Amino acid sequence: MSEWMTVADAAKELGVNQSRVRQLCISGNLAAQKFGKMWMVSAEAVKDRAKNPPRSGRRW
């Protein structure tokens, strides 16, 4: 069973703002599920992304 965290908690963990976390959820780049109006983010996905952040810069 997965553990979930709020967008605010995920943002703190990743060092980004809440809007960015929501964008990642909507685009499918961060495992999340929407319950009503609230996004809940997979704690494991946040942990993995914090360990292996995407490379900065433009993709070719």
Image (cartoon, rainbow, N blue to C red):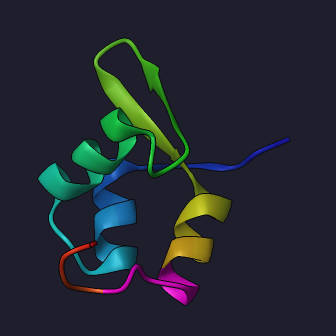
Q: Which residues are magenta?
A: 50-55
- Of the 4 image quadrants, the one containing the N terminus is top right
Report x, y in % for residue 21: 28, 54
Magenta span dominant secondary structure: loop
Q: Is residue 54 magenta?
A: yes
The structure residue drawn at horizontal position 30% and vertical position 74%, both measured from the top left corner, is 12
**Residue at the far front in the pictured view:** 60
Where is 4 relative to 36, above or below? below
Q: Which residue is drawn at the image coordinates 37% and 62% (left, top)?
A: 9
Classify residue 52 as left or right of residue 1. Answer: left
**Frontmost residue, 35 versus 16:** 16
- The magenta stretch spans residue 53: yes
Write down the quadrant of residue 60 in the picture: bottom left
For residue 1, above or below residue 12: above
Residue 23: image quadrant is: top left
The extreme top residue here reads 36
